[in-house]
Image (cartoon, rainbow, N blue to C red):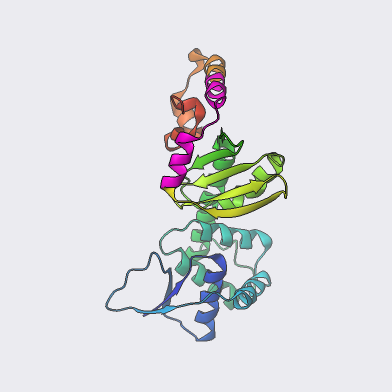
Amino acid sequence: MTTLLYDGSFNGLLTAIFIAFEYKMYDCSIDTKERYQATMFDSPETVMTDKLKAQRVWEGLCKKVSNHARREFYYAFLSGLPGIEDTLLAYVRYAFQNNSTIEKNFANSVVNMVSQTAHSVHREKHRMEAFVRFIRLQDDLYCAFISPDFNVLPLVASHFQDRYADQHWLIYDRDRDYGIHHDPQTRLVSDVIIEKSTADTSLSTTVHEEEVAYQTLWRSYFDHVNIQERRNIKLHLRHVPKRYWADLTEKTAGV
């Protein structure tokens, strides 16, 4: 079986899907170069990202499904789950083979999988928008460190760009070694690649002298508004899962 290897980008995936259709590869798989593990039965082929080919696939999908369905398609891609590329290829095949809309056909396992995955990514996006905590550094750069289950940085960028338009900030994804950086002068958000060791060192050595006081103040406020008689640990964990606590100021002991 042929395995098409792409660079991990969304345009790269769409290019691989175009190749699968162009060469009528009915029995093929798609995987990232980074994640791929060769087997004796595979015949890997590297796909070079081509924006024109990617655009043709996307435009074809636009004619077949709604904006909501295309958003789910993109959200499912951002999940980064093993095998999600094959699911999305099957989704495109199914969409192109049907004259009617497919997005509500949850009896189909592929449509249901894309919808369920997109829902999980959307929920993680909202949690990141709520749980991000910035730390002020000496150069007045506000940094936040997150470890989401999925690659949600492209989805939360506009939220923080609108909310903190006049501030210089960086949100860094530890698990994926990249972040989004906002420049208040240009009002633009850009991707930046940062090594984890560099990010951890910067956080521990360049924290602004006033940051500790602000964090102490915030924890004090959090403790005082917390009514002990109304504590409901199960409900609290449902809304604030424990895996997020390491990055929440009110849950940590300090910088």
Q: Which quadrant: the N terminus? A: bottom left
Q: 115 above or below 31? A: above
Q: Is residue 35 visible?
A: yes
The location of residue 127, given as percent across then percent down, is 55, 40
Residue at the location (45% across, 31% down)? 237
The location of residue 247, given as percent across then percent down, is 48, 35
Q: 246 above or below 57? A: above
Front position in the image: 74 or 108: 74
Tag count in the figure? Answer: 0
Classified by dominant secondary structure, the portion drawn in magenta counts as helix
| Residue 240 counted in the magenta span | no
Q: Is residue 158 left or right of residue 11?
A: right
Residue at the location (58% across, 76% down)? 50
The location of residue 57, given as percent across then percent down, is 61, 75
Front position in the image: 22 or 202: 202
Q: Is residue 209 left or right of residue 45?
A: right
Q: Is residue 108 visible?
A: no
The location of residue 90, given as percent across then percent down, is 49, 71
Instruction: Kindly indicate the quadrant of the structure image that contains residue 233.
Output: top left
Q: Which residues are magenta?
A: 197-219
